[in-house]
Amino acid sequence: QTVARVAESLVERGLFRRDGGSALGFPSPLAREVVLSELDAEDLANLHRRAASAHVALLGRRLDEEADRVGYHLAAAGDRDAAADFYARGGLHALSTRKLERAALDLAYALDLTDLEARSTSQTGNWLRALSTAVRHVRTGPNLTSLVERLTERALREGVAPVLRAYMRIDLACILG
């Protein structure tokens, strides 16, 4: 109730506007920039964490199709591995619904954000296979050359099963065309 009263007060003063039933927005991009520029890094990270939590709570069944919004906020908060999980979730969903450009974008972000040393090789390989499938159709994606270099280094390290290494190398070659 307190939050609702404060929010309504800010709307009445013109500092925020209603964007639907439960969402608020700034009345102009400039107002948003002024407010955000006044936050220190820790407060901004906390704001992004809370925004990610709010999206998870509110999206419900639509979480898979809008997982990139959660990923964005987690990445901005500095939680790269959790962001990677959400970008991958959104990318895999986009691939399953044939939204191939979105799939390529989200899966590339997931692989770029994740700690390749900490992430299991099989999961990295699954994400890579999905990215390769999407890129094969749309022929584009963000920073693919540098991403392929990082993933190639990971695929060639010891401890990667030979069959998985072979599949990863094929997928990497397919991404580069």
Image (cartoon, rainbow, N blue to C red):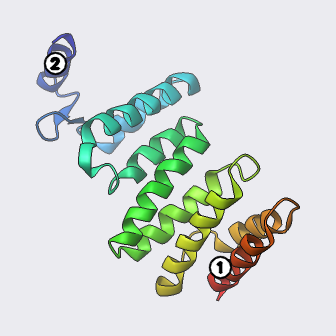
Residue 26 visible somewhere in the drawing: no
Q: Is mark 2 on a helix, strand or loop?
A: helix
Indicate whether 101 appears above or below 83. below
Q: Is 171 left, or right, of 101 in this rendering?
A: right
Q: In this view, does 110 lie above or below 61?
A: below
Give the quarter of the image for residue 97: bottom left
Q: Nearer the viewer, mark 1 or mark 2?
A: 1
Distance from label 1 to label 2 (Cα)? 50 Å
Q: What residue type is labelled 1?
A: Asp
Q: Residue at x 70, y 58 (%)?
A: 121
Crowd band around label 1 with a 10 angstrom C-alpha radius: few (<14), some (14–19), many (20+): many
User: Residue 36, position in %: x, y?
Assistant: 44, 32
Residue at numbered disc 1: 171
Please say whether residue 3 is visible from this viewpoint: yes
Check the picture and name the quadrant holding the C terminus. Answer: bottom right
Q: Name the residue under label 2.
A: 4
Left or right relative to 96: residue 76: right
Task: Report the residue that reaches farthest toward the bottom.
Answer: 177
Q: Where is residue 8 in the image (x, y as percent from the top left)?
A: 13, 21
Q: In this view, does 53 lie above or below 10?
A: below
- Pick whichever of labels 1 and 2 is earlier in the sequence: 2
Residue at 35%, 40% in the rendered image: 30
| Residue kind at label 2, given as amino acid type | Ala
Q: In which quarter of the image is residue 77?
A: top right
Residue 84, horizontal then vertical, whole percent? 55, 50
Residue at the farthest top position: 2
- Check residue 31 in the rendering and tell me which mark sits there, or answer none: none
Q: Who is closer to the viewer here, 59 or 146?
A: 59
Frontmost residue, 18 versus 84: 84
